[in-house]
Image (cartoon, helix red, strand yellow):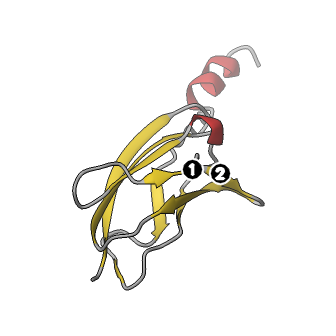
Amino acid sequence: MKRLLPLLAVFAPAPAFAHAFLKSAEPSVGAVVATPPAQLLLTYTEGLEVPFCTVTVAGPDGAQVQTAKPQPVPGHENELAVPMHITAPGKYVVTWHALSQDTHKTQGSFSFTVSP
């Protein structure tokens, strides 16, 4: 048995450490929507530490759009809801920073357009 312990240590499965990458968004990445959305819904590949996640939205003129803090979606540990107030048509850039439950940080950005 003592000879097997070193082998077991070498060949034992390592714990899976995943990162929370953006899986989908509403409005979707690159979407053109007819009406301004009242919120973003971001779905990630892993569960999140919501208090440590941030989302900003820049409008067509580059100014920050008024958003609320990201909120957890009950029953969905991998989703964030971000209420926001958009009034003008144009291209909007969403920048996100996420902290997964295993404490890995990820970030990214995408855009969507509100048609005139």
Which amino acid is tagged 2?
A: Gln
Q: Residue 54: give x, y in percent of width and height.
A: 50, 41
Residue 43: in sight, yes or no?
no
Label ID, residue 68: 1
Quadrant of the rendered image containing residue 34:
bottom left
The quarter in which the N terminus is drawn is: top right
Q: Residue 2: give x, y in percent of width and height.
A: 73, 14
**Residue at the image position 50 percent from the left and 52 percent from the top:** 67
Looking at the picture, does residue 23 appear above or below residue 105?
below
- What residue did someone put label 2 on? 71
Which amino acid is tagged 1?
A: Ala
Q: Nearer the viewer, residue 80 or 38?
A: 38
**Residue at the image position 40 percent from the left and 69 percent from the top:** 87
Looking at the picture, does residue 12 appear above or below residue 9?
below
Separation of marks 1 and 2 at Cα, in angstroms: 8 Å
Q: Residue 53: give x, y in percent of width and height.
A: 54, 40
Q: Nearer the viewer, residue 31 or 101?
A: 31
Q: Residue 19: give x, y in percent of width and height.
A: 50, 43
Looking at the picture, does residue 80 appear above or below residue 14?
below
Q: Are marks 1 and 2 in contact (CB under 8 Å)?
A: yes
